[in-house]
Structure formats: C-alpha cells, structure tokens
Image: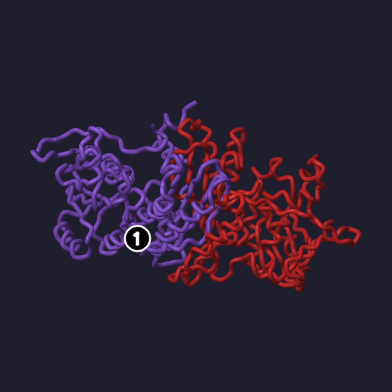
Chain colours: A purple, B red
Amino acid sequence: MTTLAELGEREIIEQFRRLLPADSSVIVGPGDDCAIVRPATDNNFEWALTSDAVIENTHFTAETDAVGIGHKLAARCLSDLAAAGAEPMWALINISAPPSMDADRLKAVYRATADTAAKYGLSIVGGDTSSSNALALHMFAVGRLPRGSAMLRSGASPNDVVYVTGELGGSLAGRHLVFVPRVREGIWLRSQAWTSSAIDVSDGLECDLRNLIDVNRNGVRIELGSIPVSASARSCENGRSATEHALCDGEDYELLFTVPEEKADKFEKAWRSAFEVKVSRIGTVTGQAGSIDYVDTDGSIVNIRNKGYEHFRS
Amino acid sequence: MTTLAELGEREIIEQFRRLLPADSSVIVGPGDDCAIVRPATDNNFEWALTSDAVIENTHFTAETDAVGIGHKLAARCLSDLAAAGAEPMWALINISAPPSMDADRLKAVYRATADTAAKYGLSIVGGDTSSSNALALHMFAVGRLPRGSAMLRSGASPNDVVYVTGELGGSLAGRHLVFVPRVREGIWLRSQAWTSSAIDVSDGLECDLRNLIDVNRNGVRIELGSIPVSASARSCENGRSATEHALCDGEDYELLFTVPEEKADKFEKAWRSAFEVKVSRIGTVTGQAGSIDYVDTDGSIVNIRNKGYEHFRS
C-alpha cells in the first residue's frame, strides 16, 4: 500500500487530473488558482471557479479566534480570484461540525465569512451542513472575467520582471487570519493587461515561483535583498533567517506576477499612483529551465533548499 | 452555551441566512436544492449552484466500497441539479484525507466521482486537497438553465397533483451508494414546463413534502397505498412498516414534484412515453396550511409522526 503521505499532494493531483476527460467549455482546468470556464451562450464573459477549505487541526485549532477562521475561509477564495483578476460574484459554503459544538462560535465564524465576502462583492448564496468529528469549512466561489483576459500561472517569458505585493514570511504568527486578499489589485492588473503570468503566494514564495514560471521552459533569478520581508518574519526566533522565512513560510496570500521588461518602469509608476500597498521588483525570469538562482546582496549565488508546504507530507 | 445539536440544522441555517445581504443577481438564495444566479451579461441563461458532501463516519465508514462513495458524491450534486431541471456543466471537488490513507483507495473514490460526473456531462475542473483526521469529500456543481425556467421548491397551489419518481425507503441497505440521479427526467420536466414545484427526496418523503409545499399556505393529502415502496423497505425487519420506511428513511434521491391538476393526465401519458422509470401519483396539495394528512386504503386518516433526518440532531 502507498499512503497519501508517501505520494505527496502534487503527485496525487497529477494522477487525479489524468482521470478527467476534456471539455471544450473548459479553458483552464485543474492546476491553476482558478478553473476558467466559458459558457457558449455568453459572448462577453467567462467564469473563474475556485474552492478552498479551512479545517480544524490542519488550518486552525479549537482555540483559534472565530472571526479569524471565518475571514480566512472567504479571503483564501478571494485571493484565488484575485490571482486570476476575476471580479467576485457568488459563493457556497459547506460546513461540517460536531453536534456538540457551541452554536454561537459557529455563527461567529459564519458571520465573519459573510462580512469578508460582502466587503468584496461576493454573495453567499447557499451551501450544505452536516455532522463530523471536527469543524471543517469549504468555500466555493465564482468570479467573472471578460473573455480571454484571465491572468494565469503560465505565460512568463525570459527577461520578464518578477514582482510581489506586500511583505512575506511569518504569516502563521497571526497574519494568516487577517490578511487582505488583493482583489482590487488583481482586477486592476488584469484589466490593464500588465502581467504575463500571476499566482497568489499560498505555499511559500519559492514553491509558488516554481508554480509560476513554466519550469520545463524557464528559470528565475531572485535578488534576495529585494524580497520584502515582514516584521513577523524578522521576529521569528528559531535559527532561520528572516529571508528564509519570507521564502518558505507560505500563507502570505500576496500576488506574485511577471511583467514584460519593456513595460516594467511604466507599470511601477502606475501601481504607485493606484495603490498604497507596495509592490517589490524581486527578480527576472531566465531561460534556464527549472533553475531558481538566489543572488545575495554581494552578487554571490546562494543555494536555499526548501520545498514549501505540501499537504499530506509531514 | 447552546450546542448545534440543541439548535438543529434547520434553525442554524435560518440564522445563517439572516446574516446575508441581498443581491439583485441572486434569483434564489439559500434554502432550495440549488441557488439560482443570473449574470447581467447573459440574456439567455442563468446558473444553478449547488454543493454536497460525503463524510466518513457520517455518510459512510472506512469499510464502504470506494466506488459507492465516489458515485454518491457526484450523484448527490447531480440530483440537486435535476431537482432544478438544470443541465450539469462544471464541478470542483475538495478532498480532505488523513496522510496515512491508502492512495489507491482515494484514487478509486475520485475515479468513481469522475465517471459518474462524466456520464451526465458534468466536467470536473479543479478543487482543493488538504489533510484531516477522516476522509471528507465536498463537491460544488454548476448547472445551466434558460432564464426564469428553474424548478423551485415553492410554487405549488391547492389541487396540484403530487408525484414521485422511482421507489422509496430502505436506501441505506445499499441504494444510497448506487442510485441514479434523475438528471434527464429533471431537464425534461423543466423544459416541458410540467411542474409547479419540485425537490429531490433526500431527507425522507414526509420531511421533503414539508419542504416542497409552502407550509405557511398549503397542506398535502397523501394516499398511503399509492406510495411506491421499494423492495428493500419491505425487507427491513425492525418492527416498522414498509410504508413508514418509505416515508421516513431518506437518501432516496428521487424527484418529488407537483403538476397542476388540469395537466395531470396529459403529463402521465407523456412521462410514460418518455421514460422507463415509473412515476407515482401519491396525493394532492390542499389549502390547509401546514397539514399533512395520510389517507389509508380504507379511507381513514392515519397519523404518522416523523421529522425525517436532520443533521446535528441525534
């Protein structure tokens, strides 16, 4: 018997994907932040579909603040929609919970989800409830996009400039429960067509860089000194450097994207006049397939080993 | 502290519903088999959104056949789409599983879900995987409907005839893992505009009759001798009659619907020429708000107490 832990999440998803037949209405299937589907009856728009979960003892504990849990459920889905540049539309929530659970706590979770969803124009329209041993919440969200405009993980070319919003690392100290999904920024990036590729940083910067650049064709060169390191990454006292935390922690939910080199200066100016949240130029896509090079402030190449977070693996 | 068990699923859902703001693109929100949403940009179609879950130790056990679990996941969502008369389009699957789980078993579950989905034209386009203590699968499905045509739970009037497809009761003996979702039948009922209201029987006939008729306005009179009782309901040996099983067991996933009296004969003829699965005329909607009368074969009124299945309650 092979366990899920031995196989790992990536391989399991790859094996699942091979079981699915093709469908011409599916523009982007499993593997991106959202699936992109196109109804034959709508000449103007297509739809971004995404789902996420927050599960007790995996994403939070019985002691975690209810408002944080509920916010995170909605904000994770909103972050996926943001990565595609989609406008939030409708969502369903599935809840499974132990019958002995305090109803007021569950209601506080649900209210926080509803509040965060409403803030970004996402209407909760239904869902399912059932009994289980531990609290688990699943959200399914639909976003809207003009046809053919979705930002995807694929699309980066050598010499494209790599950007990331906000600050990275140390999210588990608290930010993972209160983070701001970059919905406005994602819609703006998509509608102004700045990007050649985009993803939200959920598994950790290094891991999501690999998801972003097509590792069969491209590599990436990252300037370590340019990575925006959060204050909480700097205050982790566990022997790892703040930069390592920013590279490997995950749960940042910032946007990571590439902009063609010739647009980069204009893009930075436009961003600064549109948003207060900072955007950092952290590196460049290269033609060296599969290679991630970290360049230290003195110009030397640094080797950092990390695989980011992968479910099922311990 | 009030627990979920004390409050009950119906009251919890009602309290959740009050937390949600209105949205003009939402034609039908929480409380029906599907939510119905209408994109402003599509003049022809609207969308049915639904979600269901199958959870270890709630809907199945570690001994349950993998193919049955996977089939049930897809078929429950398909049954919801059928109740609205929607054409299955796209779905996402969220999986949470223990890292120690046999990967081949999970793959067999997923393959069965994919097979059942494909059989009814439902394309699986993505989802999410994460770790948890016990296996849980959630499916979110999108169906398509011509604008304004969705079959809803509301809409029945006094004198409408009540019908149910197939046979009821004893589903937990095995049928709940292999049932046929009435997708073709639901699309046909909707496209031919036969019904005044419709639901799928998931909580049990009596319970779903209450969900179907507007209990604030209507009642229903059911001829006990006309209820189609399954062979497995008849072979349950636990002191309850086969009719009680057919009324109360749940997990039948048959369509329960009303047809205006003047169309009823024509409808029955049309059904018989379209489908092999039987449809049974089991009663009539009445004007007696909130009253469900069961009429025995000798014409006497029978009182049967049951509340159907409600999650969280023991």
Q: Residues within 10 Å of mark 1 (few under 14, many from 20)?
A: few
Which residue is label 1 attached to?
Answer: A148
Count of numbered labels shown in the rendering:
1
Residue situated in front as seen by the camera: B96 or B139:
B96
Location of residue B291 by image quarter: bottom right
Q: Secondary structure at mark 1?
A: loop
Residue extending farthest right = B298
Horizontal placement of A42 versus B242: left or right? left
Say left or right for B199 vs A42. Answer: right
Identity of the residue drawn at 36% across and 64% down: A146
* Residue reaching furthest to the front: B1
Establish if B256 lies above or below B114.
Answer: below
Query: Where is residue B193 drawn, in percent x and y?
Result: 65, 69
Q: Is residue B299 above or below residue B124?
A: below
| Subunit of label 1 | A
Which quadrant is home to the C terminus of chain A?
Answer: top left
B92 or B206, which lies in front? B206
Tell me the quarter of the picture where residue B187 sits.
bottom right
Say above or below: A294 vs B271.
above
Going by the numbered disc 1, the residue's amino acid type is Gly
